[in-house]
Structure formats: C-alpha cells, structure tokens
Image: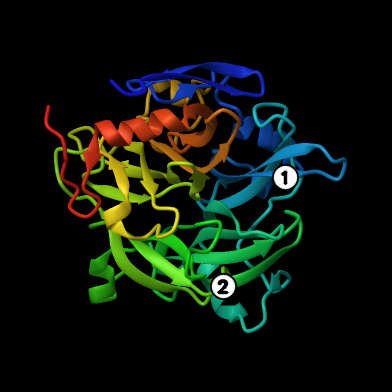
C-alpha cells in the first residue's frame, strides 16, 4: 500500500500529514501581514504596503551563533509597484522582526553593481517594481538572489535579475540573468556531475518573442533548463524539461518554478506552481516533482505528480474584513526549508496577500509522485483510476 501517513514537526509546530492531506497548515496563519510591516515602515508614507507574500527563505547563523530564519517578502505599495522587504525570526514561525528599510527597491545609481553591468538599462528595467525573490544557496556562504523586474514604460515586460549576497545586508546587483524576458528562475544549489550549474526557468510568452509585443497573457506551460559554468553566469537556456497545457489538469493553464530545489535521498525536491482555468477564475496550486541528483534536467529522470500538494482555501487569507485582497484563490511558494525527520517547511503566499506556513513530509511527497505519476514532457497522466 506504500507510505500513506507521517508526522511532521517544526520548532514546536507538529502534526500528521497524509497522501490526501500532504501539507499541514500552521493554525496561526498568516505568519506575517502588511499590518506588522506598516508599523515598522510608518516613517515613510510612500512605503505603506497592502500585501506581504511570495517570500524567498533562508536559514543562517546569526552573529550570536544562533540559527535564524530570514524571509525576503514581496509587498505591493500604493502606486501598484512591488518592493522586497526583510524579516528575521528565531524559530521561523513567529516574532518576525521587520527591517526598517526595504531590502530591495527598484535600482538606482546609489546601489552596488557588479563590473560590466549596464546600470542605466537596469534602472529602466526595474522602474516598474521588483518581486518574487528566490534565495538560492550556492555554497561558500553565498546566495544568488533571483527576482522579477518590471519595465515601467512597456506593459507586462519582465526580466529576471540576479544579485549576490553573503550577509543579507550588502547586495551586489548583476543585472539580467537572460536577455530574453523571463520569470520564475530557481538554481540548483550545487553543480551537476559535469561541474555545470543548472536552473529551472519559465520563459515569457512565446507570442511576445515572435511579435515583440508586450503581451504576456498566453501560454506559460513550459519549464526550461538553464545552465552555466558559474552560478553568476553567463547563463544559457536549454531544452524544455516539464510541460503542461493539457486538461483536465490542476496545471493545465500554466506551470512554473516555485522554490529553489532541495536535496533529498529521493532526488532534488522541486515545489513548483501550476494554474488551472475555471469558469470562476484561475486558481494557483502547488505541485511537486523529484529530479535526478546527478542529471537534474533530464526529463526522463523526473518524477512528477499530477496531484497538487496544496490548493488554495479560505484559510490561506485570513484578514480583516476591510483589508485588501490582491488575487483570490492563489497559493504560491518562493521558498522551502528542510527540517529534521523528513519535515519540509513550505512558506507560501496566500491569495497574493499574506505569508503562510505549512509542513510536509518528504517521504509522503515522494509517494505522491509514485501514486499519481505524470509525464513531464506531455503532461499526460501515467496512471489509471
């Protein structure tokens, strides 16, 4: 019958997960909202925000030698742009300390840039806001930050920018990771067997590439491999390794990378996002796949579940009646953290409005891929009812 139920625990929060309920939501969700951030950012009216969501996550050792959890969250401000803030917690659950200044704002000449970066062009590309940051550990205490930057003049044009930090204070901007429009880039935290670094990317609409238009509302049904000889690039695009676009499917309309992959005994664990078109909108769910440890971008070695591990619910956006809700029916993760005894902490945005926490068990997630296999390239289900 396989492995159907398991315990999960995370700094005092614990319970049971199963095949049918693979993610245990924290009963104290949301763990961070705009209300807590605005209390700290109150000194600057232009920073008043309405959302806190889609955060990149990291575990670090603080100056006092104690482990800390860092959250780099996205917030919408009143003019519609997004900025990235920083919060720190000792247990990764509550008592988040929000930095008094945003961690990343749209680039200016006062920022630190790597050698050779076209600063003027980068400022133009980030003028529309920065969002959905991923924290990619690449060894030696370094983290590659990948985030989306929006053009201010051309509607819906977006590039993935790359920055580097070691202390989550000083940030060096490296500019666009790719010249083509791109979103949702995550990097595997170590090179493959041939010494090449790998990434998962979601290119922008193929219609835009063909016509040069700013429209990006079409097909986002492919995850493509990226590769480089160094984590800071230059990066190149490779082949399609995951695809959807078929129905009925929880990932029929869109599919894209979510959190940076996590190394497990079953392979690289990839928590991704998928979207389904319905008569009432486009709900975002979280999916799971396992990639081969030695050759993570070979689609023949990817085990992918057709069953989502987390679908949006009312409990994912518990806010005041008068609060703004940005996009209903969305769960979206930019960061997961591995704990003890196969526990995986999934930090996810609820309805693009608040930050939540859920726990999963890695062995249960692996079993879901075995029970509900889906062909990575065709999106076809590989099991019968």
Q: Can residue 155 be seen in the rendering of this structure? A: no
Q: Earlier in the sequence, mark 1 or mark 2?
A: 1
Residue at 11%, 31% (x, y): give it: 384
- Mark 1 neighbour density, 10 Å: few (under 14) some (14–19) many (20 or more): some
Q: Secondary structure at mark 1?
A: strand
Task: Give the residue pinned by disc 1.
Answer: 60
Residue found 48% across the figure and 32% down from its top = 324
Specify whether 241 is left or right of 320. left
Taking the image as shown, residue 364 lies to the left or right of residue 161, namely left
Residue 309 spot, x, y in % from top left:
36, 31
Name of the residue lying farthest toward the left: 384
* Left or right, residue 135 beside residue 90: left
Residue 132 screen position, x and y as percent: 51, 51
Q: Which residue is mark 2?
A: 230
Question: Taking 241 as reference, is 21 above or below it?
Answer: above
Which of the 4 quarters of the picture holds residue 163? Answer: bottom right
Residue at 29% over, 57% down = 299
Q: Secondary structure at mark 2?
A: loop
Q: Residue furthest bottom?
A: 116
- Expressed as whole percent of the image width and height from the top left, the position of residue 265 reads 48, 41
**Colouring scheme applied when the structure was drawn:** rainbow
Which residue is pictured at 37% across the width and 21% down the height? 21
Q: Say whether residue 203 is left or right of residue 40.
A: left
Which quadrant: the C terminus? top left
Up-down: is 38 above or below 136? above
Q: Nearer the viewer, residue 138 or 31?
A: 138
User: Label 1, label 2: how many angstroms apart (C-alpha)?
Assistant: 23 Å
């Amino acid at each position: 019958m396989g492995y159907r139920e398991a315990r999960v625990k995370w700094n005092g929060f614990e319970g049971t997960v199963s095949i049918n309920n693979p993610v245990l939501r924290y009963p104290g969700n949301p763990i961070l909202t705009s209300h807590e951030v605005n209390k700290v950012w109150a000194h600057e009216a232009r920073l008043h925000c309405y959302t806190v969501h889609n955060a990149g996550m990291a575990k670090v050792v603080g100056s006092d030698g104690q482990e800390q959890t860092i959250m780099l969250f996205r917030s919408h401000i009143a003019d519609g742009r997004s900025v990235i803030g920083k919060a720190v917690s000792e247990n990764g659950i509550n008592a988040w300390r929000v930095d008094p200044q945003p961690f990343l704002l749209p680039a200016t000449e006062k920022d630190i840039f790597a050698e050779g970066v076209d600063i003027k062009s980068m400022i133009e590309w980030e003028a529309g806001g920065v969002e959905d940051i991923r924290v990619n550990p690449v060894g030696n205490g370094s983290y590659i930050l990948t985030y989306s930057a929006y053009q201010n003049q051309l509607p819906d044009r977006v590039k993935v920018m790359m920055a580097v930090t070691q202390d989550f204070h000083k940030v060096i901007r490296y500019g666009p990771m790719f010249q083509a429009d791109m979103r949702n880039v995550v990097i595997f935290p170590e090179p493959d067997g041939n010494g090449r670094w790998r990434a998962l990317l979601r290119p922008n609409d193929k219609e835009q590439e063909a016509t040069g238009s700013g429209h990006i509302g079409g097909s986002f049904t492919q995850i493509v491999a990226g590769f480089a000889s160094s984590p800071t690039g230059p990066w190149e695009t490779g082949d399609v390794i995951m695809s959807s676009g078929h129905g009925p499917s929880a990932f029929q309309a869109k599919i894209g990378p979510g959190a940076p992959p996590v190394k497990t005994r079953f392979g690289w664990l990839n928590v991704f996002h998928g979207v389904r078109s319905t008569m009432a909108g486009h709900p975002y769910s979280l999916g799971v796949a396992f990639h081969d440890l030695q050759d993570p971008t070979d689609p023949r070695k990817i085990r992918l579940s057709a069953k989502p591990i987390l679908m949006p619910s009312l409990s994912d956006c518990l806010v005041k009646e008068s609060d703004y809700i940005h996009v209903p029916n969305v769960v979206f993760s930019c960061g997961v953290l591995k704990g003890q005894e196969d526990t995986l902490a999934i930090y996810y945005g609820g309805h693009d409005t608040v930050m939540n926490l859920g726990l999963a068990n890695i062995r249960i997630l692996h079993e879901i891929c075995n029970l509900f296999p889906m062909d990575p390239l065709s999106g076809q289900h590989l099991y019968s009812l």
